[in-house]
Image (spheres, rainbow, N blue to C red):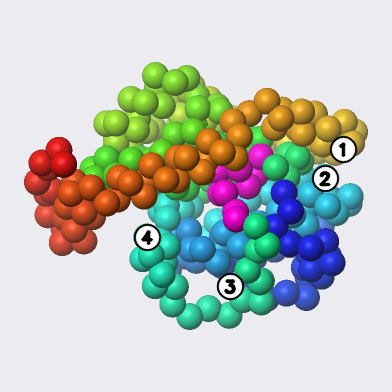
Amino acid sequence: MKYYSSEKVANIHNETFSFIEIKEAENVLTLTLDREAKKNAIHPQMVNELAFAMQYAKEEKSIWAIILRAKGNVFCAGADLKAFMGMLGEYDSTIPTPDNEILIGELFNKVHKPVITVVTGDVYAGGFFFLAGSTYTVALDHVKFGLPEVKRGIYPFQVMASLLRVMPPRKVIDWCIRGYNLPVQQAAEWGLVTDVCDESNIELTVNEIINDLKANSPSAIRLGLEAFDHIQPSAEQHKYLMSMLQKTLMTKDGQEGLMAFRMKREPVWTGE
């Protein structure tokens, strides 16, 4: 992970973030998705901000763990397709363009420090990068998990690769090609969620995990996670999957699915 110079990321607390909030305390860096009005949909600049913060966490020896949260009742609605097609809108962020391409499917895996994702809102589509990429996923028992891409004429290629890190292959394929909402308890049985909580004990669970991590060697944990990352799918695979998404978007079914979604009607598939 080397998206920015070390000198730039060391100045993180003097930067302006538009899409996330950051807080550093007691060896923990907390990142909060801060785009509630857009259901925390992933914007290209949000990716840049996350990469900037994650590189800081990787290089800063005093950071032993990362917590990821989100504002609102939707943790993440997936990618902001308009933004990724160039309609970025206005934002006030001082985080610069990265020196290298950021592959969001690899972002959390390369930090080599424990990541705890705290899910208090619904998750859809590309939002599962955050859950599958984290070391621990702590979720409220009533949130919804959905992969609706096939209903829009596209397919969650990179999400599929990330899910395969933590879930059985047949379960992942079934979810991807049927596009249903997955109950949280089922997600826990399949390995996507590590802890299911209610409102009364979710913060207690997060604190217990943090305290357990702090009792152990941060150096040993870092090197262990680096070793785990070494045996996982490569960046080339993620680039291939991105190209497959672009190919799918250009099909007639892909165009029809997105148009039908925008017009709030049922799509008419042709298989082309």
* Few, some or many residues within 10 Å of mark 3 (<14, 14–19, 20+): some
| Residue 60 lies within the magenta run | no
Give the residue type at disc 2: Trp
Place of residue 127 in the rendered image (x, y in percent of width and height, measured from the top left): 47, 48
Helix or strand or loop: what does disc 4 sit on? helix
Q: Residue at x 61, y 34 (%)?
A: 234
Between marks 1 and 3, how big is the CA–CA gap?
A: 30 Å
Relative vertical location of residue 21 with respect to residue 113 in this rendering, above or below: below
Q: Of callouts 3 and 2, which one flags the residue occurring earlier in the amino acid sequence?
A: 3
| Residue 106 lies within the magenta run | yes
Residue 94 visible in the shown view: yes
Between marks 4 and 2, how big is the CA–CA gap?
A: 34 Å
Residue at label 3? 18
Place of residue 205 in the rendered image (x, y in percent of width and height, measured from the top left): 67, 37
Q: Of callouts 4 and 1, which one flags the residue occurring earlier in the amino acid sequence?
A: 4
Residue at label 1? 218
